[in-house]
Structure formats: C-alpha cells, structure tokens
Amino acid sequence: MTDLAGELRGAVRGEVGFDTGSRALVTMDASNYRRVPLGVVAPRDADDVSAALEVCRAHGVPVVARGGGTSIAGQATGTGVVLDFTRHMNGLLELDPVGRTAVVQPGLVLDRLQEAAAPHGLRFGPDPSTHSRCTLGGMIANNSCGSHSVAWGTTADNVRELSVLTARGERLRLGRDWAGAPDGLRELVEGELARLRTGFPDLPRRISGYALDALLPERGADVARSFCGSEGTLGILTEAVVGLVEVPRARALAVLSYADESAAAEAAAGLLPYGPLTVEGMGADLVPAGAGLPPGGAWLFVETGGRTAAQAHTRAREIVRAADVVDALVVTDPAAQRTLWRIREDAAGTATRMPDGTEAWPGWEDCAVPPARLGAYLRDFRALLTAHGLRGTPYGHFGDGCIHVRIDFDLLTETGVGRFRRFSEELADLVTEHGGSLSGEHGDGQARAELLPRMYGAETVRLFERAKSLWDPDDLLNPGMLVRPAPLDTNLRFSVLPRRPVDVTFGYPADGGDFRAAVRRCVGVAKCRTASVTGPAVMCPSFRATGEEQHSTRGRARLLHEMLAGELVTDGWRSTEVRDALDLCLSCKGCRSDCPVGVDMATYKAEFLHHHYAGRRRPAAHHSMGRLPEWLRWTTRTRTAPLINNLASIRPLAALGKRLGGIAAERDIPRLAARTFTAWWRHRKPARGTGDLVVLWPDTFTEHLTPSVGRAAVRVLEDAGLRVALPPTLPPRRGVIGDGRTRAATALLTARRARVCCGLTYVSTGQLDRARAVLRRTLDLMEPVLRAGLPVVVLEPSCAAALRGDLPELLHDDPRAARLAAAVLTFAEALERHAPQWTPPAVDRPVAGQTHCHQHAVLGDTADRRLRTAAGLTGDLSGGCCGLAGDFGFQKGHFEVSRACAEEQLLPAVRDAPEDAVILTDGFSCRTQLDQLAGVRGRHLAEVLAEALESGEGATKPAP
C-alpha cells in the first residue's frame, strides 16, 4: 500500500490520502454497506484521473468514483482507491441558454447548476431530494430522477454527451449513433436485438441493470444514455453535456388528502393525463405535527405550472376536481410551497425512524412498478411486510410508480440478517410479478444486484456481464456492483460494531441509552453537506466554512462509527483522527434539529472529549474557558474585575494571557462588568407586583459580563406585572423560595455561598464529571423552586438549551433534572405564558441579527417572533451560526473558521440592514462576535423593550 500511495502522489496533482482519517470518511455511503478503501484521491482534472487509473491498473487495485456519497445501495463504497470528485472537479464549465445545455464536471452539486440556470428561466429537470448535496456525476451513475420526473424524465433523458475514461486509459466521447462505443459493443448488441427488444420492462422508472436497450437502432444507438445508471462500473466520467428545461413562470401546489397511501396510489395514475409537474405521495407517519396539511392519512403533492399564477392555479384546481379526495389544499405562495416540499425532502431521513423510535433501514428503498399497478402492488407489499413481521412507511414518486420505504430490519443479529435476505428475495419476486424494476431511482449496487436474475432472467444478466467485460476487461471499476455482485447480506456496516453497549456518561434517552445506536443515527443522507442555507437553518457551519467531509456532521459520525468498530480507527476514545474532526465542531447543536434523523454531534463531541482526556493533560482552553464560571466568581469574590480589565488593555500582557490560556491571538478579551447583576439586585428596591412569581436565572454571562441584560429583563418582567425572584444561594428552609438573599440561617456557619450554573462550559469542553457535580449542586439549590413548581426564566439561549437539553441527559439518574428542564422558559415564553394580557411597548422599527443557534435547535423561537411582532419589530432574523459559539471562536486556531461562519449570514444581514434597524442578538457570543468583527453593538430583546419602556413609547400595563 505504501508503494501505491507513493506512486499516486507522484502521478497526480490532487490530494492523495492513505491515512486512517481519509479512509474512514468514505467507508460508507447512505446505504447499509461498508467497505474499507486503501486510499482516496481527489483529482484536479481528467489528466489526474487518467494518471490515477494507470497507477491502479498497474497494481491491480480497484477504483470507485464517488460524488456526494448519498447512494443508497452501496455503490459509492469500495476496497481499492476512491476518486473523490467533489473537491476539485466540481465546476460548471459552460452554460448555453440558447441551446439549453450545460457542460459540467462530475463533482458539481446539482443546486449549483440550478442556481446558474435559474436567471435564464432554465433548470436541470431531475431533482432528487438530496439536490443540495448530490453531484451530477453521481446522478448520471445512478440515473437519478426526483419528484419532477413525470414531467422531465430521468437523468438519462437529459444527458446529451459524456466524456469518459476507461480503466485502460482510453478517452471516449459518448453520444448517439454509437459515438464513443468501445470495441465490440455494437457487435454484441446487433447479435442480441430480439432479447433487447423484449427483455426489458416498459415503465418510466426502470433503473435496474444496464440500459442496453438504449443501444437499439430505433432508439438512436445512444451510448451516453446507455452509460447512465452503470454505477461507475463501465468507465469514469470526467465531463458531461446535459440538457436544460424551461421553468414554468408560475407554479401551484395541490395537496390532495386520502385515507391511506394505497388510496393515494390508486389515484396517482389517473392524474397523469392532466400534465402535472409532480405526483408525489407520502403517509401520515412521515408528516410532523402542525405541518398544515389537510386532514387525512396520506397525501399527494401535485405541482402544476403555467405562464401566469392564475393559469397554474386553474390547473391545480382542475386536478383537485378530477381527484377523488378526502380534502384538498391549493398553495400558490412560493414560501409556503417550499415549506411543504421540505417535509417531502426530509422524508429520506425521517423514515429512518419508526413512530416508536425503532430504527429503519434502506435496502428496498425504491422499487418501481407501472403506475397503474401501484395501488395493488402496495397492498401486496404491505402483506409481505406483515408476513415477515416487518414495518415500513412507503412514500415517494407515486406518479411514476416508484416507492421509497425504510424498513425496520434487524441488521444487528444473525437471525435478523437472515430475515432481511428472505424478505429481499420474496420482494424481488413480487416486484417482478407486477412488471416492475428492483430499482426505480437509486440503482442496484450491492443491495439488489444479486437479485437481478429474478427480474431479467439468467441470459440477460449474462449479457450484462459480457457488456461489462467489453468496457472493463480487467474488472477494476467498482467490482461487485451490477454484475458478479457480492451477496446482499455481506459487508453490512453494523456487523463491525461492538456487541455490548459502550460505557458512556450521557443518557441518550432517544437511543435507549445506547451510544452505538446514537452513532447509527447517521444514515448518510448528508443534509449537513449543504453548501449554503436559507431561512433559520443552522447545520453544518464548519462544513460550509471548510468544504471538507471531516468537518461535516456525517463525516464526524462516520469517524465515530469507525472508532467503535475498532478495525480502521484502532485507538478508541484516544483517537486523534476523531479528535481532529471534532475540533472544528462548533457545538452549535444545529444538527440536533436540522438533521432529518436528529444526530446530536454537540453531545457526541462532549462525550468523546470526556473520554479522550480522561487522566490526561487537557488543552489550556479547557481550563481557561471551560472553567469560566469559576474564574469569574473568583474575580467577584476578590473584587479584581477592574484590575483584570486594566491588565487586559495592556497589549503585551493580554497577548501573554491569551497564549497561556489557549485563546486566539486575534481575539480581544471581553471586559468584565464593574458590578455584577446580583450585586445590583441586592441593592435595588424590590418592586411590588401581584402577578405570577418567576425565578430569573443569573447565568454566568449576564452575571459577570452583560448585567444590563439582566436589569432590562427585570424591568420588562415587572412592567408586565410579574414578581421576580432569583435562585437561592444556599439551600433554604423547606418551602422558602430563593430570591438571591435567602439563606438557611443554621447553615451560615458550615456552608459556603453558591450560585446556580447550567454547566454549559464544562459540557462543551467535555469535562462531564465536573459538569455533573455542578449540576447536582444546582439542583440542590433549586429544590424549593422545583417544589413550588415555579417557572425559571433563562435569558442566555445557550444556558437555557443546556438546562433543557443537556441537564436531563447528563443527570438522567436524577428525577429533579427533568423537572428543572421542564420549568425552563425563555424570556419571550415567560411573558407569553405568565403575562398574556401585557402589551409590549411599540418600538416600530425593522430588525436584523441572528436567532441563536441553540435557540433554533433546542428551544424554538415562536414566542420570540410573536413578541417582536407585538412590539412592532418587523423583519426576520437570519439563520446560521455566529461562529463564536461559546468558547469555540476564542480557541487558538479557530479564528478563521469562526469569522467565515459569521460572514455567511450574520455579518451580511447586519451590513445590509436599514440604518434605523434594531440589531437583535440574544446570545452573548453573537453580540461579542458582532462587536469584535464589525464594531456593531447587538442587543438582547429584553434590552430593546426596556429601553422603549424607559422612553415611554406606549407601554401598557396588564388589565386589572
């Protein structure tokens, strides 16, 4: 392997990675399968591809082409050298609006092509749900389709010419009339004309096997079309000319509801004569509560187009009238349509969990039958599931007769794998009986290739093998796929995981307390690899900043999987590969909400760091910032905040302090408040109120760094008629609610004064033993608050998220943890629930800024948006992550990534804001990032409302 790696490094200009981390990142795609490659090459151009093939051919090493790695049948994995086209060969080389064509490289992500074509009123027709990260090369390899295939066909229908390198180095330009055909292919076809004319099912989604029938003379002997769907087994694509279609100027979406998915399937084929753009189906199990769909058990999403909005709407209404529906909804607003389509697109991930949380897997993801037979097929399919004691939730392209489904296979035990095989064999027979294709979109790969004789017969499969031998005589390109396949029940990715649960600290309640199950959550759909986000989405800022797989949520999950497997990553929790991949994880928690399967990498990172540094020396930043609450309380006790501020203003001393503390040299050290929030509280005149009593949490940032936020919150809460108290500083007598002053008199001689703490800084640096101790002390202090059932108002979103999310998972053995988590409210939630009659002051100004990533992921911002609206604060806050993310942006080596994250949404939103805009950033990190990178002061919503109250702009007291 050393010789191979060295020769590749000498032959190609792109990167060559034979290290453990590079290999571990590509052991899996989005399928059930796993193969460990020898190495990864990221070619820069076709010459690099040719050079890599020459070296691999000399060594007899297989080659696998890989795009976004979202294949669901295992065809993007291999044991030889993986060619990663996403790093360099990802360009749009030419776009011809007049000829409606584009010239693309194989690593180009589909959305980038769509963005370039859109200003010309054009688009590429096929659009898989992974359009934000799948590549054109992968789409051509799998003959991908998507929701609009009823109108615009498959990828093969939209390919004009392909530039291909064979394994033996021949450069071919594939097209019609035998253009680019390898020697012998024409003779092979002409000798099998009868078989090619009669042996292939006639249906819109026949993806299985090689498309040799595209080489028939009556079909133009189209070698490029025949190459589509060959899964990288015939040649390596280096360039493609693809056709573009005209986009309707206006669209409408008819959402048709039915009693169940069989009823929806029966209706789908009858809608095709009306010329819809889509006929997509999904059941209630995949639809989140409050999705806004009309009542029913299943739905068809039928999109129509037109030259005008009225024409598109008329066509949608015509379809509603023609459909036999329970109920219907026609949506014309583009934003509302996008929201509904996201439900459908996320189904590929959502379907990996059954309603009861049971895991479900691909493998029979996309069988297709003639659309008119879909209803009958679904009934038989359901019966087969029941016969095997399995469950699944069908959804997909009902108008094309193509069904996606994840099934709750047991792929962890020998008995379960045996059932998987038996079911697969019987389902293949069922699909064939209905005149269908084993694959209707994602290809055969290892999942279905073994069963192709059941669909095509042995003679046709032997014909496939002969065609493969003409293209690739040495069987170097993706061997084991399509022809001479590996058995469908081998190379399963779960077989290498430990048989016994791993000893961990967090509770992982959604995964039955099993860290292995938590890591298995990542099925590889790679939504985290999206290059840009819109709206409130956050995941995955470090990938968008670096573009590297290891800094995506999926990449980190893959490395954790390999760590548990112990075959490639052999040093377990001590792994430097896993540590380095997690180093740029911002712990923004965006994946917790934005990942369709709820991967929570922030928690996994904390768990890993806890074990990685157990009994070892920690980085300086873990001490300087991980123990920040302790240092800040020390400055308060010693009254040294002014001294520290003065020292930090002396540049050489500040530089020394930052170097010793592991803090980025580019960062300024935030100034400490001269007077803490609780010091102000103790000396204020208590307000008299008659409303509900709420406990205001004095988080570390509000207490020591921005007490103005706490003072403003008290002002607003009391204006709303609420009575405000602070948590106890010592466990008080039973029944006494702490107000920041209350202490048990008998304990004063034996106990030290303490403060509540959410443990956030300890958790984010993986100091979980310390975090548990801090949180248990906090629960002791909060016992009277919990006994009284009082709401706890937390101003800092990251602290609120830690209390609501991390606390019950870290102290899963303490029932008080869940009670405190349930008591936590954000500032806006407290006003909405406990002062519903209060009217906020009329600020009447536009807003700009950012929703805190932890609020987006854990807390939600619905109440905040309603409060802003009530106060006349207009406009939306941006999504994404500010990039500072607690200690992340302060750590040495993180500054550039931190700044790149801020430049994605936050800084542009603030720069483009109107002059009179209010800059809202509830998080201390967000405000600090704005201040240090843009010189802009962001404010907490409480500060904005308090200022308006002070200026007398329309505050209204609650009704008596």
Image (cartoon, helix red, strand yellow):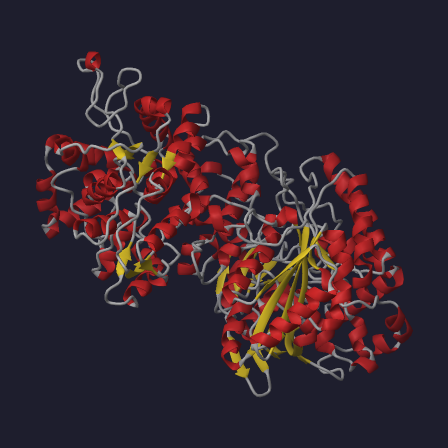
At horizontal 13% and vertical 34% (from top left) the residue drawn is 684
Location of residue 784 (image quadrant)? top left
Query: Does residue 891 appear anywhere in the picture?
Result: no
Q: Does residue 717 appear to the left or right of 520 in the view shown?
A: left
Whole-percent x and y of residue 910?
29, 63
Callout count: 0
Residue 764 position in % (x across, y down)? 36, 40
Left or right relative to 950: residue 317: right
Task: Describe residue 618's horizontal placement relative to residue 581 as left or right.
Answer: left
Q: Is residue 521 visible?
A: yes
- Residue that sits furthest to the right in the current view: 194
> In the depicted view, which residue is nearer to us: 555 or 350?
350
Which residue occupies the foreground of this view, 348 or 165?
Answer: 348
Residue 528 percent location from the top left of the image: 49, 55
Q: Residue at x 67, y 45 (%)?
A: 492
In the rendered image, which quarter contains the N terminus? bottom right
Q: Quick check: 917 above or below 389?
A: below
The C terminus - image quarter? top left
List x then y, in percent, for residue 426.
83, 47
Residue 729 sits in which quadrant? top left
- Furthest residue to the front? 960
Outermost residue toward the bottom in this view: 98
Between 777 and 326, the residue placed more toward the observer is 326
Q: Residue at x 11, y 52 (%)?
A: 651
Q: What residue is rendered at 20% in x and 49% in y?
A: 949
Q: Quadrant of residue 822?
A: top left
Q: Is residue 53 above or below residue 888?
A: below
Task: Judge whether 571 appears above or below 310 on screen.
Answer: above
